[in-house]
Amino acid sequence: MCLSASTAGAVLATSVIARKGLLEREGELALLGELLANVKSDGCGAVVLVSGEAGVGKTALLRQFCDHQASGAQIFRGACDPLFTPEPLGPLLDIAAGLGGDFAEALGDRRELHELVGALIRTLATRRPAVLAFEDVHWADEATLDVLRVLIRKIEDVTALVVLTFRDDELEWSHPLRRTLGELAKQRSVTRVKLTPLSPDGVAELARPQGVDAGELYRTTGGNPFFVVEVLASGGDRIPATVREAVLARGSRLTSSARSLLEAVALVPPQAELWLLEALLGSRGNDLEDCLASGMLRSEPAGIVFRHELARLAVEESVAPDRALAIHRRALAALADPPNGAADLARLAHHAESARDVESVLAYAPAAAERAEAVGAHREAAAQYARAFRFADGLPPQGRADLLEHQAEACYLTDQYEEGIAALECALEIHRAEGDRLREGDVLARLSDFLWCPGQAHESERRAREAVTLLESLPHQRELAHAYSVLAFSCDRGSRGAEAAEWASRALELAERVGDEPTAVNALMVLDADQALERARRAGLDRHVATTLTILAGANLSRCRYREAARYIREGLDFCEERGFELSQLYLLAFRARFELDQGRWNEAADTAETVLTIHRTSTSPRISALCVLALLRARRGDPGWSELLDEAEQLAEPTGELGRRGPVAAAKAETAWLAGDREGVATATEELIPLARDLSEGRLLGELGSWRRLAGLEADVTTPVPGPFRLQLEGAWADAAARWAELGCHYQAAVARAETGDEIQLRLALDELQGLRASAAAAVVARRLRERGVRGLPRGPRRSTRENPAELTARELEVLALVAKGLRNTEIAERLFLSKRTVDRHVSALLRKLSVRTRAQAGAEAVRLGLAQGE
Amino acid sequence: MPRYLVERRFPHAPELSVDAVIERNAGDGVTWMHSYVCEDAPTMLCLYEAPSPEAIRRAARRSDLPVDRITQVRVLDPYSYI
């Protein structure tokens, strides 16, 4: 939809601001103009986030820009609706109406997310340069946010300036937009424009012609342009106590029939189409004209809208209940039979509820939920099912239980556990009262699945066993197979591998017999995740693919297989993002934070961990993991605030009693104690969990806890098998462990192990590496050791100058040089450093060249002279 | 918002565009309050308000400023005791 300049101009002409142009927005307008010019000149897209409080003038800025400065560009605008459960992809439908082409077709066919975005990019390429504006994205449905995320990730291919406007004062922590914003924060092509209220001078400039007390006006409005304009437009002779009054006072100057039109428009967000108004009120002469002239309403191509949402809210709340009910009833009837296109189910469900029309709610809300599910908007779907249930008293019990179970499913996918658990508990009661044992058992099993994520591990297992017992007493069917698989998971998460395998085998066997592929895949996740992945893919079981990718990412990470872990994390994140699987995505992000920490990519690890922490959700595992990563980063860097993070992680982990959640906290506590030189602290942090970890064969955790004990000079168990480098550390083979860590790309671990060899060269190398990582606290531990050995003149910060390392050797070359100086041959060095002989040959020739020497003996002498190695 | 004292040791006397630094800080919610410049060494002690140590490091990275030590601090002044 191209915004016509005359429409906007006509409306703006009625406002005080129009005569002045836009006050105090020159900078923002210039910035937008500059960005659009760049898009034109290099054909590479850009994103602008325009934020500010309600009424600060985001829309006015956008309109001013589109009307006066975006000449030559085509403009497409999509608005998000303030409905409790918005129409999925609503703003994109707006845009498709103007844009047409492949995109309109793809949207009409409800294609998958990536195809949709592909079509959008293709179509935009034919309309270049374009401005693509999404207004009020704080109201956007999930499906729209998904499209925006993918679109912005591919922004370099988009030949458009993408503008998003949103209210930043109303985003509570769990708002889905927060996550989108968090992800955008990392993109270079994103520009933020924060609109602030007008200054006292700006308000005075507006107030002067009206003869209003500017100081008082500024005080009551806080400089909010909407408030200011509303108050001034209300006559200006008297300053209303609140803007609500200002809005209503302005409405009250209309004739009573015009006012009822105003109310009708207020009750049918997002906009009142002309045909809808006619159906609601009949033909009304000049009322619409009056309302438009009053400046409270605006005519848009899609219909009549309030000039400002705040005004709509004020009017909506002021409508008498009986009149509101009548309007909602008529809106319901009219929207059910629109003159063109299909009925908008989300709007129908909204009016059905407001009209208290039980039958219609039960017809439209579940249908709207299904539509939302189809486009991956599971949060909207859950809300629509919940809405239907509120009106379901008259339904048969099984029908009510169906709604609850659907709602729970949608809640599960979006990590809304409290709601989901409550819905399942309620469904459970219904099945019990009805004596439907099969469905009772089935719901018990699902409840078990739900209870684990928020940390109720014991309760989760109890429910799973209850489900198995109940279902085993009935003829053995797919429900029992599913219950077995849930119990298998429960045991697996409790680190009881053998028992988990036993239940999983039973699940697999029964699932194969009754032909239940999803349960078979569930069982395989415990028994053989690679096979689970393959079968889930083949059967098109997206949810199972997501879960299996998450399991594989975590398993590879805990076995120090970083390359494989990286692959699964990347693949899993892309997969989940495109399908709206927020739960798996959260786990994968937590894994990514750990991966980045281990791989020495600390800045990225901090960003990722912060992203996980800003998403306030009920699943505690990812949060615990992210808290530990951030705490370790701070502790290693010598930054303040790590102990608070560990305290929170401990409070979340302890009550679950699960090793999987308590382990990372214990390991982090042990490390921070080691950094502080607190041997007692290391002992306390590790004592309790080591026997547990041994009983449950948790190799990685044993390796970590044992290593910190050894590093702190405490004894550690070496009998239980632990993954590669940890085994070397427990055996005291520190040099070998260091080489292995370095090979795995874990430079911090490598440096810590290297320092433990006790060799002075190794200590110096470790210090260098730790300073390079900006790990001040760990570097201080090593520096203290060196000083204890009488070494003086250690660099205090990272080596920047070439003075300390005149030949500019790399860390690896320094390592090789130290061994050359000891007289080792290349094959011996290769063995020692876990490198191929060819690689060592290359390092040796490079360091000979850099040191400007011809023989190994000369290189050794040079190393001693430079203080890089000790003389004989 | 917590306050942090940030120690910055420059390899050589720094040339800073203070305006640009302040603007880049804003993106991370980091506010520079004031700094003490040491007379005899290219070292600065800078007082900031910031949501977290990570935000300070992020802002520093963007402005290419060194961070040698971050300490969380509280204000204590004699006037509170008179």
Image (tube, coloured by chain):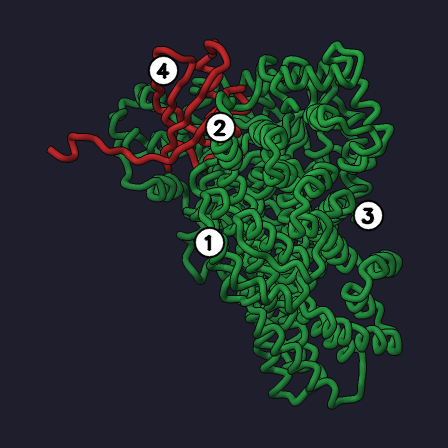
Kindly report the distance in space between the C-alpha atoms of the residues bearing marks 3 and 4: 65 Å
| Callout 3 amino acid | Asp
Chain of the residue displaying label 4: B
Q: Earlier in the sequence, mark 2 or mark 1?
A: 1
**Residue projecting furthest to the left:** B82
Asked if labels 4 and 3 touch by Cβ distance under 8 angstroms, the answer is no
Q: Earlier in the sequence, mark 3 or mark 2?
A: 3
Mark 2 vs mark 1: in front: 2
Residue at 55%, 30% (x, y): give it. A774
Mark 4 vs mark 1: in front: 4
Q: Identify the chain drawn in red.
A: B
Element type at marker 1?
helix
Element type at marker 2?
loop
| Callout 1 amino acid | Glu
Q: Determine the colour of chain A.
A: green
Q: Is residue B36 above or below residue A319?
A: above
Can residue A294 be seen here? The reply is no
Mark 4 vs mark 2: in front: 2
Expressed as whole percent of the image width and height from the top left, the position of residue B81 reads 14, 35
Expressed as whole percent of the image width and height from the top left, the position of residue A618 reads 55, 59
The numbered disc on residue B37 is 4
Q: Is residue A625 above or below residue A720?
A: above
Chain of the residue displaying label 3: A
| Callout 4 amino acid | Val
> Mark 3 highlights which residue?
A109
The numbered disc on residue A648 is 1
Crowding around mark 4 (Cα neighbors within 10 Å: few <14, some 14 to 19, many 20+) is few
Kindly report the distance in space between the C-alpha atoms of the residues bearing marks 3 and 2: 75 Å
Are the numbered discs 3 and 2 placed on the same chain, yes or no?
A: yes
Expressed as whole percent of the image width and height from the top left, the position of residue A385 reads 62, 65
